Amino acid sequence: PELLRIAFIMIVGIFAPVMDSTVVNVAINTIAKELNTSIDAIQWITTAYILAMGIAAPFAGWMDNRFSVKRVHIASLFIFCIGSVLSSLSWNIQSLIVFRIIQGIGAGIILPTLQTALIHYSGGTKIGSLMAIVGIPALIIPILGPSLGGLIVSNLPWRWIFYVNIPICFIALLLAHKLPKAEPINKKQSLDSIGTLLLSGIFITFILGISNARSLILSSGTLESMSAVIPFVLGLLFLIAFIIHSLQTKSEPVIDVRLFKLPGFSSSSLLIIISGIISTGTMFILPLFFQQVRGESALIAGLMLAPQGLGMLITRGSAGKLTDRIGARFVVLVGLVIVVIGTIPFMFINSQTNIIVPFISLLIRGAGLGGVFVPITASIYEGLKDEQISYGTITQRILQQIGGAFGTAILAIVFQHYLLFGNSQADAARAYNISFIWSICFTVFAIIPALFLPVKKAGN
């Protein structure tokens, strides 16, 4: 009961940051018109938010260890709330981007601190069940967020998409003070400033490279520009420098790369990237598929994604309990097979297909995804000591962002490539069908690292 109470308090804390991104995306066109700016420029209110989250994540691990998870959670909620207030007062696109960065810093600390706090408070037990519980907002909000954003934009000034965060943050701050006292793990831990800068450099360059590549493909159908190549090259250089630094530093590194020697840690890390591709990437093309191929409105397209969220809700609890009982390997393998089964119909669905087919397919696909996310989230902490928990959390948050961005970019590029052969509704359906084939291929590939996930023997 005490753990459930803590989990509830933490869920309220992450509600606003998780909802914010989905609501803001719906309002992008409206904001662009009112601030008299281009769509290319307005996209930076999303990109800047993601970048700020990625940069803040490494600092979250150090702060959690040195100042206690309770204090860090309260401070990050306050930062996010201030960012929301300032965003609602923005007078031009430049000010909005700056204030979104403040929001992103708060969100980037809140989300990893949530997981680190639960591991500390639980003593490392029942991790699968706890992750299933705290992951519920991530399932519900992508369904409710677009609808809420649509209602706000249709009936109220766009600034209300930030106003709604304020009362949620206020309630979350009141509840956060009721969290049990948490002692810092290492009050004297120094910040690995060099490692943090290098890690931030990796994240920034890869996200910018992916974003630029996607923009180039969608606008011109080609990658013949150094704006996409240079960030990836710099990212690889940052990565090499970070590995060398992590191995040679005499102080506590922001992430100890030696942990990748652990089969559970390394396989979970790779699966986190792939899960970002098969979930975030596919979720990017699904609403477009319903709108462009089946002719649905944006609101109806968003509601048609509900079966996938429902499927994930149905299996999350069981997946968490099974992970605690038998380990992650078999749960993930079964989940991946179910995801493939649920995605196969989208290889053939077109404008004439009965609506029941995508409905049932998404329900099945969601059930499979629910059996994938919880085990890999829990297994990354397998075998880690208390002082290493933050490493797992930071690694997970950064890899999730990179995997999601890469998945969105790669499937958008595939779709655009095959759409070049024609612009009819049938051609669009064919391009989407092939994009779903790519999603299936990534899912099948995920079986390989899943074979190296931990299992629990009887009696353990």
Image: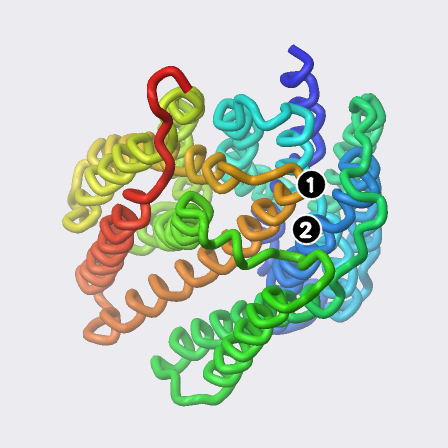
Residue 284 spot, x, y in % from top left: 41, 53
Q: Are marks 1 and 2 in contact (CB under 8 Å)?
A: no
Callout 2 secondary element: helix
Q: Is residue 158 above or below residue 35?
A: above
Residue 411 spot, x, y in % from top left: 34, 62
Q: Does residue 305 appear left or right of residue 394 in this picture? A: left
Q: Does residue 280 appear left or right of residue 185 in this picture? A: left
Q: Is residue 452 above or below residue 313?
A: below
The amino acid marked with disc number 1 is Thr
Residue 293: which numbered mark, if any? none
Residue at 65%, 66% (x, y): give it.
200
Quick one: label 1, few (<14), some, or many (20+) residues within 10 Å? many
Residue at 62%, 44% (x, y): give it.
388
Residue at 19%, 64% (x, y): give it.
427
Quadrant of image for the N terminus: top right
| Pick the front one: 158 or 100 | 100
Residue at 23%, 49% (x, y): give it.
444
Q: Does residue 115 appear left or right of residue 110 in this picture? A: left
Q: Does residue 28 appear left or right of residue 439 in this picture? A: right
Q: Earlier in the sequence, mark 1 or mark 2?
A: 2
Q: Is residue 18 above or below residue 328?
A: below
Quick one: label 2, few (<14), some, or many (20+) residues within 10 Å? many
Judging by the rendered image, the residue that carries numbered circle 1 is 113
Judging by the rendered image, the residue that carries numbered circle 2 is 108
The amino acid marked with disc number 2 is Gly
Residue 221 spot, x, y in % from top left: 34, 80
- What colouring does the structure picture have? rainbow
